Amino acid sequence: MFFYSSGALSIVHLGLRGPSVLPMRIMLLGDTHRNEAFARKAFEHARRLDCEEIIQLGDFGFGWNWLPLTDTLAICRFSAAISLLVEEFGIAFSFIDGNHENFDRLVDHPLGVDGRREVAPGVWHMPRGYRFERDSVSFLTCGGAVSVDRLARTESVSWWAAEAVTPADVTACGSDAVDILLTHDAPITSAFFENVSTTGYGIQADVDVLRNKILLETILTVTQPTLTVHGHVHRHFVQDLGSGRRMIALAHDRAALHRAALVLDTRLDGWVEFLNKPLRTVRSAEKAQ
Ligand SMILES: [Mn+2]
């Protein structure tokens, strides 16, 4: 039913749309956990692969450490670091929320006219239910997940109630069909859970986790994405959902980049191509064409 990526050439033609209008490469990136060294490697990876934009899939690490700007004003250290990378590399950056974000401070940043919030110059948060298009491919985002170790955390210090997906979030996602759904948590049909029956953190954690995954599954069922990509489980795998639909899990900052990052390429007419392999393989594959 699913397989772990071998790291070999992996190109999937989804046939989402007609002829390409604008060449576009987007890198989707798994949990960054406010790891600045990993973020730099991710930007270097994106530049080598000619990506114009990075979209990070939650557990970005917003608002855990602050750099004071004035006596009354501070900026999230990791967001500031990403802002500098955006400027240095000239690559756009957005993230969806995971479960490890400071939601109290995230909502301090007002939503802009396009529906995102800018948390540092060039660093954008895509809220739950946010829809956008790139090169005629439609996207929908829904962050959020439940921290299984919530009881070991302190509210508003290391845990925020707003982490969990709510029925209102599902409503915000709407019912229009979408090509690509980006989430943090894995929907309940994820193969990751085939052999996992409990979180190991008690019945309440089990129930909360299950509820979150069912809410995400509702979005998937209603919007019928051809591709769903998520983070949270810290492992990479590709799952065939049948009828040409796929679900891909991206690994995290402690994994190799070809497992934590996925490139969507809309340059080929009528296709989206996924490059998910070490750079060396990419280069030799491109030469052979
Ligand atoms: Mn995580």
Image (tube, rainbow, N blue to C red):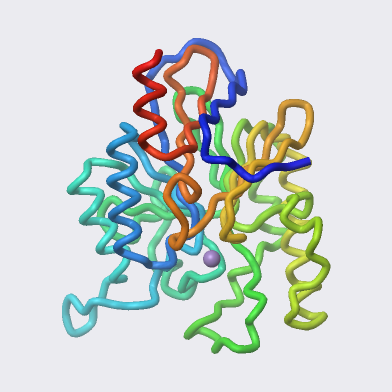
The quarter of the picture where residue 145 lies is bottom right
Q: Residue 234: tell me if it is visible.
A: yes
Quadrant assignment for ligand 1:
bottom right
* Closer-to-camera residue (47/160): 47
Rendered residue at 37%/25% (across/down):
284
The quarter of the picture where residue 209 lies is bottom right
* Closer-to-camera residue (74/13): 13
* Closer-to-camera residue (40/150): 40
Q: Quadrant of the N terminus?
A: top right
Rendered residue at 78%/49% (across/down):
189
Q: Position of residue 12 (x, y in %)?
A: 59, 26
Q: Position of residue 20 (x, y in %)?
A: 45, 14
In the image, residue 183 above or below residue 197: above
Rendered residue at 66%/62% (across/down):
165
Q: Quadrant of the C terminus?
A: top left
In the image, residue 285 above or below residue 83: above
**Left or right of 17: which side holds 3?**
right
Q: Position of residue 72 (x, y in %)?
A: 23, 82
**Left or right of 139: which side holds 284?**
left
Rendered residue at 57%/55% (across/down):
231
In the image, residue 139 above or below residue 65: above
Q: Position of residue 207 (x, y in %)?
A: 81, 72
